[in-house]
Image (spheres, rainbow, N blue to C red):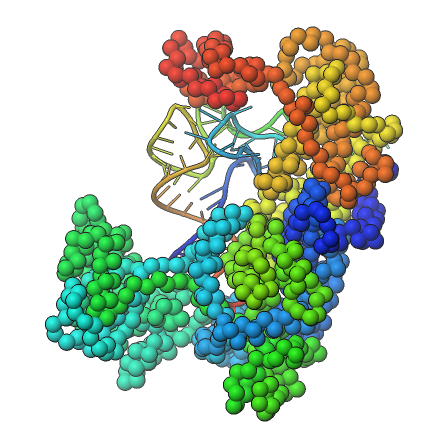
Amino acid sequence: MDAHYRPEIIEPEAQQHWEEKQAYRASEDSSKPKYYCLSMFPYPSGKLHMGHVRNYTIGDVLARYHRMKGYNVLQPMGWDAFGLPAENAALAHNVPPAGWTYANIDYMRGQLKRLGFAIDWQREVATCKPDYYRWEQWLFTRLFEKGLIYKKMATVNWDPVDHTVLANEQVIDGRGWRSGALVEKRDIPMYFFRITAYAEELLTELDHLPGWPERVKTMQRNWIGKSFGVEIHFPLLPSPPGRRAGDEGATPPDQGPVLKVFTTRADTLFGVTYVAVAAEHPLATQAAAGNPALAAFIAECKQGSVAEADMATMEKKGMDTGLTVHHPFTNEPVPVYVANYVLMGYGEGAVMAVPAHDERDFAFAQKYGLPIRPVIKPVEGDLTLPLEAAYTEPGILFDSGDFSGRASQDAIEKIALVLKNLGLGERRTTFRLRDWGISRQRYWGCPIPIVHCATCGDVPVPADQLPVVLPEDVKMDIGSPIKKMPSFYECACPKCGGAAQRETDTMDTFVESSWYYARYACPDLTTGMLDARANHWLPVDQYIGGIEHAILHLLYARFFHKLMRDEGLVSTNEPFTHLLTQGMVVADTYYRDLGEGKKQWLNPADIEHTPAGPVLKADGQPVIAGGTEKMSKSKNNGVDPQALIDQYGADTARLFTMFAAPPEQSLEWSDAGVEGANRFLRRLWKAVHEHVQAGVTPPFEKGGAGGISAAQQDFRRQLHQTIQKVTDDIERRKQFNTAIAAIMELMNALAKLEGEDSLASRSPGRPKNDLAPSGGGSGGVSEPGAQRIRSIKQEALEAVVLMLAPIVPHICRVLLKALKPGACLVGSAWPVADAAALVRDEIELMLQVNGKLRGKLLVAADAARDAIEQAALASPEAQKHMEGRPAKKVVVVPGRLVNIVA
RNA sequence: GCCGGGAUGGCGGAAUCGGUAGACGCAGCGGAUUCAAAAUCCGCCGCCGCAAGGCGUGGGGGUUCGAGUCCCCCUCCCGGCACCA
């Protein structure tokens, strides 16, 4: 072996070797248990960023670790290749989206290979290829026929200048990002996946995913948002006399026109002082007909973006429609308002407002001088009137007719029952989750396989006519080229054969990423979407990806798995058994204002920090700091890992990324520390090189402990404790920074062991360090033979190289060969701790007096509680700090500490 | 605004079940080596204090023999909010 560590030589060599041997090709024929390790595939944006390196290194460490533990590992990779950035690049650089995408894929594949990931490249998929999206179209037609896909109107962001639909991301401060025009809401027809049909299962199955982080399950539960409430009908006309609250025996009368609302707080029904409807609600439209001011207000509500974050943060505005509905119990008239915060696509598009008991209604009522009528008081005590803020807790009803005196929960039940008997409402369970609109008015996506026929309506494209191929040789312009391409959209109706038009919308790119994990099992299949191999590999044993996907992608993928299950394509209920959500890699952002809400984002690498603030290196002119955000193409704050790889090699990049922070934590990028990771690898190389210079040595035999010095025994204990810790860190804790730290400590100890050895040869009796067990009757340390030291070093270096192999495979491949000529890293097993080396006869306890650390206590490992207490009380430190007071209590935590309370 | 996280030395982070706060690394400082530098090796390194000791995990309160860890309130930062992926 070379005396110097040269990653630029050994890394390409190792990569070439693995590729030639197809070392990481996964096969279904194996007696080993399968382990499917999957990292979220990248969008081919141009080049890898640090988030990718982090994500794929975590996946690779787990894949390589499980390979060493005897699993048949599948680790595939592919490309989430459809999407908006390709269209933007096409407009900016005048290249077709397809060409841009394929070039990016080629470059990024090269980068992934240069990082040495143990990927089965034979299974690579790109979602923009017809052999992939063909099956997505096929499934679409199946679901369409089953009624799991339907068409309805939906609201989008409309740019009135560019005449295009805008993504939420493209709306900045209410204006289109290219045109700068004020964005409007516009209703267009769209196809929807009926995900709400699976809402209940998506919710309950979360309870059977112990391998998922609790925070992700919580977020999904809240997103699905199952709530138990009451649907209440407010009649538009006064009800006939004789109907009374509590009149349970009454037969439901004929229903006149009613306004339906849903509420989880039916107990506050007597506190309703107005109802609010969405601007798009039929009642609002009706009232606006003869009311120009109201019509103008409704038009104003239709300005701005459809993003919920914008809706929720904007100023709450409303206007009286002049219409009234009637309270279902008291028959009192209740005014109907139009409010900009009520969403049409959500529930009934109308809410009952109870200012006394809802914060938003309270603020609204104050603003518009509407009455505030308290009807709930705390179980203990009273409300202070007049209310200064809404009282939103449950409590006891008052001023609520027959229901006064009841507790909230009880009242809800009772009110629901009475409403039901009156025919004016009933108990209902609703979900916050809405159906998934998948139509996109964009070019670079999977064509929706529907033909519109004047006679037959919407006809799904028959399986034998799939795929509907997206033309790739197009000229990009504002708007989708296929909408202007008769050769694409003119076709014959598959049903009647008459002239018809193809749908020109494409699918949401979340659709492709909802099933790719299954296609990796059989990417070459030309006769169907999936075959038996999918059931061999699924579910994914370990899925790794960014926390930003906690809700949408992961929920859609779970939904798709169930759709595929119900099509008989897979046999499991959930796609991902264990989920690791990687924290974001974040970096500072910088920009210059170009006016009209447009910004030019500048890369942090091009920024220099001066006392006067950040400036652009190129021109020395100031730039604006935009805060710390996740690395993204749109904010241009990605750090290019290529420079890191070029300078230090893949192993250093991998080691540093794993060492910088635990995987689940967000990581603010900084290059500081890369040097240290590289230094460690150089020291490791040197240690192995110096060791093997003296020739081949067999490792110290496990279980054998006879005749080795206390220092050597301590070292071997540390070695085997480290094996235990690293195993636990990788397998259970999935925390690699502490595993690396433990190995670094072990290497530091190994270096000291050598020093001690040479010292011992000069003067017998090893120098004591404070923590080492003293006494034990050994007296003089036995002079260790050079061969014994060498065998212990061999044992340690072999273990270190194997433990580091999942993290830094290239260097470990060379080091293992040097330590064990003929050994092969790919087939090597993970080291196992030697139980005999872990045995300890003395332990150190912390000594506290009144909770403050005052000293340390060395006791036999099997010392009884009494003996420990006596030793603690007798110690000089305890005597000093007890100051003559008697011990009131002695707390002994076995193996940890003694606390004397005096 | 709503939902989910986070905050520990100059910096990244450790402390796994309520039990030694600051492992490991970076930066810094001192020394060895060198003609010199780089590299390497050794040592020091939370704050106050000569020391004994005291203080210290975003802020305020609480539970406990003992709190970075549990509970309540607050501040700031990050992710998501259904058309970025």
Residue B5: give x, y in percent of width and height.
Answer: 48, 47
**So how many labels did they put on this image?**
0
* On screen, residue A648 above or below A487: above
Residue A329, located in which quarter of the rendered image? bottom left
Q: Between residues A30 and A542, which one lies in front from this camera angle? A: A30
Q: Between residues A612 and A521, which one lies in front from this camera angle? A: A521
Quarter of the image with the N terminus of chain A is top right
Residue A342: give x, y in percent of width and height.
Answer: 35, 68
Residue A768: give x, y in percent of width and height.
Answer: 67, 14
* On screen, residue A726 above or below A198: above
The residue most toward the left is A242
User: Going by the image, does A877 lie left or right of A408?
Assistant: right
- Please give the name of the residue rendered at 14% of the width and 61% of the height, measured from the top-left corner: A401
- Please give the name of the residue rendered at 41% of the width and 10% of the height, measured from the top-left corner: A883
Could you tell me if residue A237 is visible in this image?
Answer: yes
Could you tell me if residue A363 is visible in this image?
Answer: no
- Please give the name of the residue rendered at 75% of the width and 51% of the height, measured from the top-left corner: A24
User: Going by the image, does A206 lie left or right of A586?
Assistant: left
Residue A203, located in which quarter of the rendered image? bottom left
Quarter of the image with the C terminus of chain A is top left
Residue A270: give x, y in percent of width and height.
Answer: 19, 62
